[in-house]
Image (tube, rainbow, N blue to C red):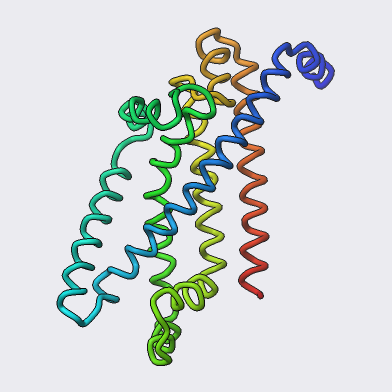
Amino acid sequence: MIEKTWSDLRAFDYWPEIGEGTLDTLAMTGCALLFTVIIGLLIGTLLFLTSPAHRSARPAYKRVQVWVYQLLSFAVNVLRSIPFLILLILIIPATRAMVGTSLGVRGAIPPLVIASAPFFARLVESVFREVEGGVLETCRAIGATTRQTVFWALLPEASAPLCAAITVTAIALIGYSAMAGVIGGGGLGDLAVRYGYQRFDTRVMLVTVAILVLIVQIVQWGGDRLVARLAHR
């Protein structure tokens, strides 16, 4: 049985395509994760700072914060409610306008970011809500500005759970990147669709699934190790 399996693997003709697809998956996931963390962290921080519990006592500022929170919250909820495959198709014109194509690694990054940034933003908002209230009160008492409060208190105190949120988002992006293969997004998902589904080659399907599982396990292991290190810092 083992010898037959080894022989089948040696006779597998798609290893170059599998290698290229793996690199494409890692590239699109890594780039999308970078933009997702930047955009999602900004939106999540704004959601936290303009939430009812942290609004200014000044009526003029408070009205602005209410509008900002409602608009951001509505946009985040709308984007999170659209299934990723439908979102891929909906924003094809916008993707072409932004990067010049809707195919391949470059064409998959914008929809990946648009789908995952609202998800990460909500995780950031939830993480900041768990920060001990005394820390924020201390910042206010010593006259720290909002910028100083975010960089000196929120981010350092929430570093471990933020790392866990990034790990969860990265794993979600790996799944999204595989689904992008349905419309020619490149990577392992594209191979699974073209060879595994359209050509009925079960071996390609199994190999791509195995590699995706391995990538997810590595990302989860690395994320857990980093979270444990930050938590005991």
| Residue 121 percent across, percent down from the top left | 39, 56
- Name the residue at 66% across, 38% down: 214
- Above or below residue 59? Residue 80 is above
| Residue 153 percent across, percent down from the top left | 49, 78
| Residue 74 percent across, percent down from the top left | 23, 52
Q: How many marks?
A: 0
Q: Quick one: 122 or 111, which is closer to the camera? A: 111
Query: Outermost residue toward the top?
Result: 199
| Residue 45 percent across, percent down from the top left | 39, 64
Residue 66: image quadrant is bottom left
Q: Quick one: 219 or 99, which is closer to the camera? A: 99
**Residue 217 located left or right of residue 56:** right
- Name the residue at 67% across, 45% down: 218
- Name the residue at 66% across, 75% down: 233
- Name the residue at 34% across, 30% down: 94
**Residue 159 located left or right of residue 86:** right
Quadrant where the N terminus sits is: top right
Residue 62: image quadrant is bottom left
Query: Outermost residue toward the right?
Result: 3
- Above or below residue 152? Residue 105 is above
Query: Outermost residue toward the bottom?
Result: 141
